[in-house]
């Protein structure tokens, strides 16, 4: 049922959003480095690599510059138009093609590069690869301000590896253990809601029983609405 819904949702979305996608593609072709799409290898179901589509928002050689595949707020590798696309998440829309093809689902653990996937604890890695990765999901919603958190840290890479990824791994493990049509539909609704109301703590009210965030993350302002978790 989830795969059927993935095909329907992604197919309809591609048709409905085509008046937006085409102008973005033209604007990218005429600006920056002239690239429209960026295809990056990510780890998918079963640990297999697949090419994830995004609108091009960074310099072509960005994986070999600065912080590599980890992006921080105000990253100098991001192109001018790319900042707008990343802020509004419009750069993620080409992944509707990945969903339609079957590489991804609408909802699931966010697909990671090998460097980022390796930052997950081994127990989280083993669970995450059991399902298709998603355009959105529990971890993506909780960490929708990930770049801001890293920018605020004096040691962004350490904070990413030692705080963000272990907790995000626990969130993704929770999703795998609780996956189902009801979880899938609720994640879609909450994703739409937090796009409209970024400061909302709806995630913690809708999904009871989420892992409690570490104190260092809460102190940094992450996991909105979970300073006193209502999801015990």
Image: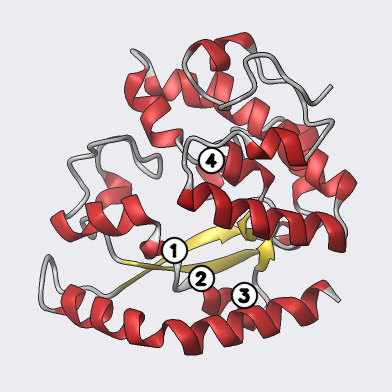
Image marks 2 and 1: residues in contact by CB distance under 8 Å: yes
Mark 1, Cα crowd under 10 Å, few <14 / some 14-19 / many 20+, is: some
Q: Quadrant of the N terminus?
A: bottom right
Q: Is residue 111 visible?
A: no
Q: Nearer the viewer, residue 46 or 135?
A: 135
x then y, percent, for residue 124: 76, 37
Tell me the CA gap for discs 1 and 4.
18 Å
Mark 3, Cα crowd under 10 Å, few <14 / some 14-19 / many 20+, is: many
The residue lying at 69 percent from left, 83 percent from top is 7
The residue lying at 88 percent from left, 47 percent from top is 178
- Give the number of the disc on residue 95: 2
To which residue does mark 4 refer? 116
To which residue does mark 3 refer? 99
From the viewer's perspective, tell me whether residue 175 is left or right of residue 147. Answer: right
Up/down of 201 relative to 213, above or below: below
Image marks 2 and 3: residues in contact by CB distance under 8 Å: yes
Tell me the CA gap for discs 2 and 1.
6 Å
x then y, percent, for residue 66: 26, 36
Callout 1: helix, strand or loop?
helix
Callout 3: helix, strand or loop?
helix
Q: Quadrant of the C terminus?
A: top right
Q: Earlier in the sequence, mark 2 or mark 4?
A: 2
Q: Earlier in the sequence, mark 3 or mark 1?
A: 1
- Give the number of the disc on residue 51: none
- Give the number of the disc on residue 92: 1
């Amino acid at each position: 049922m989830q795969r059927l819904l993935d095909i329907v949702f992604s197919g309809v979305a591609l048709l409905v959003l085509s008046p937006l996608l085409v102008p973005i593609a033209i604007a990218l072709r005429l600006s920056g480095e002239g690239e429209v799409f960026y295809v990056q290898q990510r780890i998918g179901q079963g640990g297999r690599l697949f090419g994830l589509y995004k609108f091009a928002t960074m310099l072509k050689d960005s994986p070999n510059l600065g912080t590599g595949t980890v992006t921080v707020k105000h990253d100098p590798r991001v192109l001018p138009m790319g900042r707008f696309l990343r802020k509004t998440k419009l750069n993620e829309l080409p992944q509707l093609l990945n969903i339609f093809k079957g590489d991804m689902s609408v909802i699931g653990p966010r697909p990671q590069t090998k460097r980022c996937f390796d930052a997950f604890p081994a127990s989280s890695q083993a669970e995450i690869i059991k399902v298709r990765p998603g355009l959105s999901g529990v971890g993506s919603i909780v960490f929708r301000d990930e770049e801001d958190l890293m920018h605020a840290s004096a040691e962004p890479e350490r904070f990413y590896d030692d705080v963000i990824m272990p907790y995000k791994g626990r969130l993704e493990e929770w999703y795998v253990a609780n996956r189902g049509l009801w979880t899938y539909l609720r994640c879609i609704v909450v994703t739409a809601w937090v796009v409209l109301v970024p400061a909302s703590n709806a995630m913690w009210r809708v999904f009871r029983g989420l892992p409690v965030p570490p104190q260092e993350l809460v102190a940094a302002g992450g996991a909105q609405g979970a300073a006193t978790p209502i999801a015990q």
